[in-house]
Amino acid sequence: MGSSGEREPPTGLDPEQQAAVHAPRGPVCVLAGAGTGKTRTIVHRIAHLIHTGHVAPGQVLAVTFTARAAGELRTRLRALGVPAAQARTFHAAALRQLRYFWPRVVGGEPWRLVEAKLRLVGQAAHRCGTGTEVDVLRDLATEIEWAKASLVAPDAYPVAAERAHRQTPAPVEQVAQVYRAYESIKTGARQLDFDDLLLHTAAALEEHPPIAEEFRDRYRCFVVDEYQDVTPLQQRVLEAWLGPRDDLTVVGDPNQTIYSFAGASPRPLLDFTRRYPDATVVRLERDYRSTPEVVVTANRLIAAATDRPAGSRLRLVGQRPNGPQPRFAEYDDEPAEATAVGERVRDLVAAGTPLSEIAVLYRVNAQSEVYEQALATMGIPYLVRGGERFFARQEVRTAMVALRRAAAEAPTGELPKIVRELLEPIGLVPDPPVGGSARERWESLLALVELAEELAATVEDADLGRFVVELELRAEAQHPPTVEGVTLASLHSAKGLEWDAVFLVGLVDGTLPIQYAEGDAAAIEEERRLLYVGVTRAREHLWLSWALSRSEGGKRRRRRSRFLYGLIPQDHPAARVAGARDGGSRRGCRVCGAPLTGTVGVKLGRCEDCPANLDEELLGRLREWRGERARLLKVPAYVVFTDATLTAIAEQRPTDEAGLVAISGIGAAKLDRFGAEVLALVARQATRGEQSGNP
């Protein structure tokens, strides 16, 4: 799997990193672009504050969003000689504090953490007469988590959900009932979920001054990583930790805000200087990760965004030597796309790129199947699951038990050889299995041997006992070793990682941007940022591809993602093919020929201020039809078609499926569901026009 380590300046810290590290105590905002060395900057700032006597090691609390990221911070802080500085996730820090203060705030035994959340949600759903299928329960749990992270109570949920355009698994009033029942059942069982950890911690500090005073005396300096992804609930906890003080360093990148669906918001980052007018602001834009060619693609992609506040715009500057140009490719169907990806992977490996430095990234997990099949057919090892679950795998847990038992007997000899011999009975056979789960288990065990080899090479006289300690530290930090195999992962799960070669696949409208984002400009822009995150995962080789149909021989109804316009060189075959298929409209306005970048302009096929040949009567009939369909389907009207899509239909008046699917926002699913009705409406209106003599 790809690493989360950062490429660094050739010598020490660059000038901007130094400015962040040496900034005085008080509010500091570091706007750090992808690959600019933010983790290195964070740990050096913490070490600088400690080594210069500004704060004691135990008075520092650094928080981030994943156990893996927190583990990496702790590892780097240990290397800089400050192991006592705390680095935890928000939830881990809150759990530790809540357990400490519980006897004084609540009394009695601390409530247990919810172990089976879906079971509680299922009980609540059953009580409210809502569906209890597993997928429905998962979606209900997601809505409850979003509401709590957004500080939305059950009574306020319906209005908040409508305002946020939530795609709910049931009517919003019914979701609110399930939310209310879930809280009642959970409280009755004296249990807490993860959001409760934050809610109760904030309340303890807000409502009990002696506890707040004790906590604030204990922790004097706070550092928040990935601040662009903070939720209102997490921001409330942070403010409770701080109290009236301002000894806070935040690090984030508004271009990488991709968790709004979970309640995250970049507003605290964007408004930091309003809250702290005297704050030091440092911009990190030197990209040490990616080649200039990848950086140029990333900059072009994000430059087309429509909601970037001027003060937060970061433009990456590549620091590495030149590399290959990104590759763009279009295919008739997904199997052909997956086969091409597999062939390119094989070429990269033959040229020396390790399998673990290659990733195939997609928008939704359901896209992985065709790539799994293609790679398996070619005999290319791959891993689907994320690295943070490495130490939870059964074979790894079994191996660690065996290693602990053997370490108690203090065996002597070469460490890697001892480890390999101990793991052979568990499944580390001499020859790797062909594929599937057996291959994954074998790769996991081999990764432990390779970790032993790494320890033996870097730590003098390392023995099995020292190796077991290293494994336990990594397990606690969720800091797994690299497993040899191509990584298949969603774009969301790839955040914070990087690879030498990245394949971004399935880039079609309806998938990226995802179909349910249509009609919500903010959601569309978040989809753009998600693709930006994918592009910036690549160090050297970048591949962007899409397929015009799902299955072999299927109708070629799909359209490449709107986010690719302006990225593909005009002389590239993919640009020419797409332009011919779209009648040239995708390369520019159909009225004046100017390039189209904005979402509305792309939908209309023209600049927003260019003259429109709009059939007002047809538009009115389309809106009436949409309203009827929305009422029948019990969904908001924009879910059927957005206003911009209806306007485009009324302007372009398509006469067949090809013309209809040429309009942005109409993919295969909507064509199958609504295409015949829309074309019939357009045809009837054309007949009326002919009979009345109108053009």
Image (tube, grey):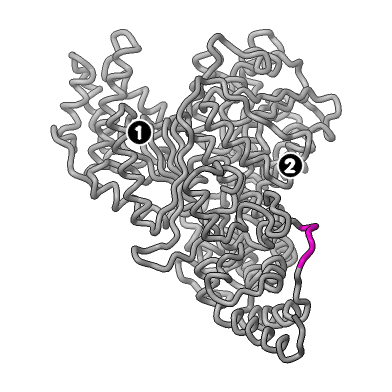
Q: Residue at x 49, y 62 (%)?
A: 558
> Is residue 609 rendered to the left or right of residue 485?
right
137, above or below 19, in the image: below
Q: Which residue is mark 1?
A: 356
> Is residue 114 rendered to the left or right of residue 93?
left
> Is residue 109 rendered to the left or right of residue 265?
left
Tell me where the magenta segment starts and ends, as one range: 608-612
Indicate the amino acid at tag 1.
Ser
Indicate the amino acid at tag 2.
Arg
On the image, which quarter does residue 19 sit in? top right
Where is residue 464? Give x, y as percent. Answer: 26, 19
- Which SS class for mark 2? loop
Q: Which residue is nearer to you in this view: 166 or 551?
A: 551
Spatial CA distance of label 1 from label 2 is 35 Å
Q: Which residue is mark 2?
A: 308
| Residue 609 shown in magenta | yes
- Which SS class for mark 1? helix
Going from N to C along the chain, the mark reached first, 1 or 2, is 2
